[in-house]
Structure formats: structure tokens, C-alpha cells
Image (cartoon, rainbow, N blue to C red):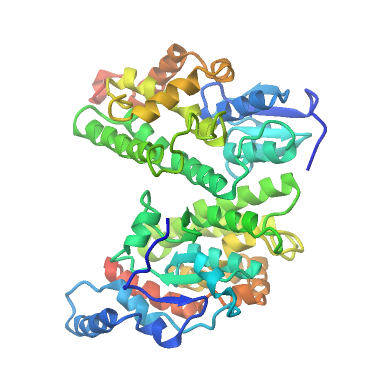
Amino acid sequence: MIFPSTAHGSSSVGTRDASRDLFPCIECLRRRRCVSDNLTRGGVPIEFFHISVLLRPHKSPPHEPHPQEATMAEAVVLLDVWVSPFGQRCRIALAEKGVAYEYKEEDLSNKSPMLLQANPVHKKIPVLIHDGKPVCESLVIVQYIDEVWSDGAPILPADPYARAQARFWGDFVDKKIYECGTRLWKLKGEALQEAKKEFIEILKVLEAELGDRKYFGGDAFGYVDIALVPFFAWFYTYETCGGFSVEAEAPKLVAWGKRCMERESVSQTLYDPLKVYEFVGFLKKKYGVE
Amino acid sequence: MDQQPPTAFDLELLGSWADSHTHRVQLALKLKGLPFEYQEEDPLRPSPAVLLHNPVYGSLPVLLHRGRAVLHSVVILQYLDETWPRGRLLLPSDPCDRAAARFWSHFADDKLAPSVAAVFSSCPGDGRKAAVEQVHQNLKLLEREMGGGGAFEGRRFFGGDEIGLLDVVLGCGSYWLAVFEEAMEVKLVDPEAFPRFHAWLRDFEEQREVRETIPPIDKLLEYANAVRQMMLGGTADDNVAVN
């Protein structure tokens, strides 16, 4: 089953065209003017997607596909949103394996028929569509990428016990970081203090697991690193909103994040923490948080 | 990685008799013909052994393989497949099918199970109606996936002709549907609304290994009623609606 390409949302084969990053289509151009008006008039709900489109900075593509790879790239499509740490896991995994793919930016306020058809259960990104078949949920996608492109550098280790440990910690990151982190920017007062306490505890648990290793996977960058590293760009937002310092609470974790950023797959995928903070700032306005 | 078949002392399972996640591991071990020692634990009062081997959550089940702990039932099932790959496998070989099994296992734990639990803790009236409707919405999604164009179209079990990982994950827990239907006097699995799911569940429950693993429904019902009494406080003076 091949999904037709949609007119809405940006689409570029493995590369990120600079102009299309900021103005995906004429419709978004038109709405951008309306959004600017809304901002100056105030009182009208901000279309946060279109803000996020405006905010999304240009990034060089992590992988320039060879012209002959263009056809192969069309067979692999990633439905995603630029700032999503879950989508970034998939992008990092694809880059680590050197897989050419087509990136499609989704408008979460106006989900494409492709997304709704590919993920009817949750209607969420990321979704990887490979030869027309959808794979949903970021860590399921990462394992799928590892299994299909098995001649690339392995993401999960070979040893079954190490794999079980990796899956456990990937699940821990999934259950804990985003939910608690979101409370740090959404809540105030007592509830915020509670979230801060929990988040610091989560960081310490992760740091204890990392220990003195180069990566969570040991010497090799792997599954747990991929699961967690997109949130490295969110640490600035979390610590600023929460009133603490990630580096003070978990210095080894910050050092690990910096090491990961030395990998092209990570540095080409993560956005500047200030951009993430700016994005969350607009989310806060949308949800009436201050 | 191909290991020698385990002796009875290689594998120890810490679990609870009424815990569906424990049943998943017990069933998987039985399907694979892997011998193991079983230690009954109290899920509300984790023993020092559980806290030692699962310091992050203190939860069950915990599988110990030569003293090393493997945690989370779905992780354990995959560990068993990968450690003894020559035996009966729970995960399919095709990466797309494996992804579907993992995705729907998460659905079972993150959506279906909480919605079923919400029925259990609901009070009679609109709250219970809404909780039941949520279960139906979730079963509808599964039912659709088992039908035309779905990932599991035309299969006897989610794993194909034999029980696989997703059958174990969904099946060990689906008996609560029958238990809560009785305890809460609601209809959760209507054979007319969910014919494929209903047929799959009956087929699953008739398998020998499943019958040997899942406790009798009346024992589970007794347990559920006791837990519900505990949740509701159990006295009329509390002004709590008791079913």
C-alpha cells in the first residue's frame, strides 16, 4: 500500500531545503501573516504549529543521499515534527545506519491523511513508512531500523542480557523523562517543586546507570543513548523552568551528552537548546502557563 | 546466542499468583519447555530480594538467570527468545511483524490494561459507563487490526498458527475482562461487537499451557472482590457507593 504524497507539509528527499524549512507551502505563508496579526492583537489562540514552523531553524541534512539513493529514499519515509525528541530518535538511528529517507514535517494541528492512515491508533508522530508499511512508536522504530539495516553499526548489543538491560533503560527513559519534564514547564508552586524533586531523582538514577562509561552502551553508542540524547537539548528548558542546574545535579550525564554531540548523527539532528526553550515558551502561552 | 538448556537452578522467577505479568513469563517458560524455580512474592510488600534485583521499581515479575535479573515481562519474553533461539520462538522473524507485536504489546500495557482497571475502580453510574466505553474503544482498535487489511488479518493467533509474544501479552490479562464482567456486572467482550477478539480469546484459553498457567476464574474473582473491598474501605459509614 503506497501512500500518496500530501500537498500540505514539507517534503524533501533526505535533504532539508532552507526555504522550505521556514515556509513549507503557500498555505503556511498565508497563515503566517494571520499568525503575526494574532500575536499583535492578542486574545486569539496562537496556532502553535505555525509558530513552530517559524521557529524551526534551518539545519544541514545529516545525510546527503547519492542520486542513485533517491529511489531507495522514497521507500523510507519518516513522518515527524522538527522539535520532537521521539522523532529525533528515529532520525539519529537512520543516520547512524546511513539510511536515505524522505522526511515529512507534520502539522499536528492539521494531521495529514498519511499520518492518520499510518497511525490510526494514536495519530502521533513519529511514524516510519518502509515500502508502504507503517511502523509506529519511536523505540519500536529504532529496533526495526536496527533489524532491517543489520549490516550497519548495531544499535542494540549482541548479548541477550545486555539487550534486556538496554530495553529496560529505554523503557525507563520513555516512562519518566518527557512526562516529568513537561510538568516542569507546565506547573507552578508546590506541584513544580514536586516535579523538580522527581526529575532530579530521575537524572541521578540515569547517571548512576551510566557510571564512568563513555556511553550507556559502553564503548559503543547505542539504544539507550539514542533513547535519551534528544532530551539533552531539552535540559536547558527543564532546568530554567524548574530552577535547578542539570550540570550541578548530574555532571556525568552532561559530559555524556557533550560526547554524544560529537557524533554527526546527533549534532545534525538536535536543535540549539535556546530554540527548544523558545518553542516551549510559545507552548506555555498556548496553555496559558506563566 | 545459543545457551545450553537451563537446569532447574538456572532460572528463578519472582512473581505473584494473581499478577498477569507474572503469568506471561510463566506461560512463556512453559511454551519453551524451560524449567524454573518459582518464588511467590507479595506485590504490595516487596521482599529484600525484589528490592535488590529491581531497585528502580521494586515490582514483579523478576526473572533471575544465574543470579542476574531481567525485568519487565515483555523484555523478559524477548530475552528468553534471544538466549534460547533454537527452541520455540515467541517473536516472529519478519521485522515488520516484530514491530507490530511490540507496538500492540505497548498498547496492551499502556491503553487496554489501564482502561480495564478503570472499570474495576469505577463507581456505578456515568463513571462506569464511560470506563466501559473506553474499553470498547480499545477493543475496537484491536478488532480492526484482526480484520481485513489489518496486521493480523486471517490469523488464528497473533503469532500465526501458534501462540506468539503478543498472544501471551494480551492473553495473560484478558481473563480480567471476564472477572470484571462478573464482579462489576458489565459487558466488556460482546461476541457480536468483537467476534474476532472473542474467538481468539476462547481459542487462546483452551491451549493446554494456558490452562496450566492461568489460575481458576473463581479464585481470581475472589481476589478481585477482596481488592475492591479494600479499595472502597468496606464500611457503610464511609458513605462510599459499594457495588
Residue plotted at (47% across, 55% down): A133
Residue A231 visible (yes or no): no
Quarter of the rendering occupied by the N terminus of chain B:
top right
Q: Is residue A286 visible?
A: yes
Q: Residue at x 45, y 87 (%)?
A: A18
Q: Quadrant of residue A106?
A: bottom left
Above or below for A47 versus B60: below
Residue B165 in which image quadrant: top right
Point out residue B177 in the picture as x, y percentages from the top left corner: 38, 25
Q: Position of residue B155 (x, y in %)?
A: 48, 33
Instruction: Give the vertical position of B40 relative to B65 (above or below).
Output: above
At which x and y percent is residue A272? 51, 80
Residue sitting at 41 percent across and 80 percent down? A56
- B123 left or right of A54? left
The image quarter containing residue A279 is bottom left
Q: Is residue B189 left or right of residue B204?
A: left
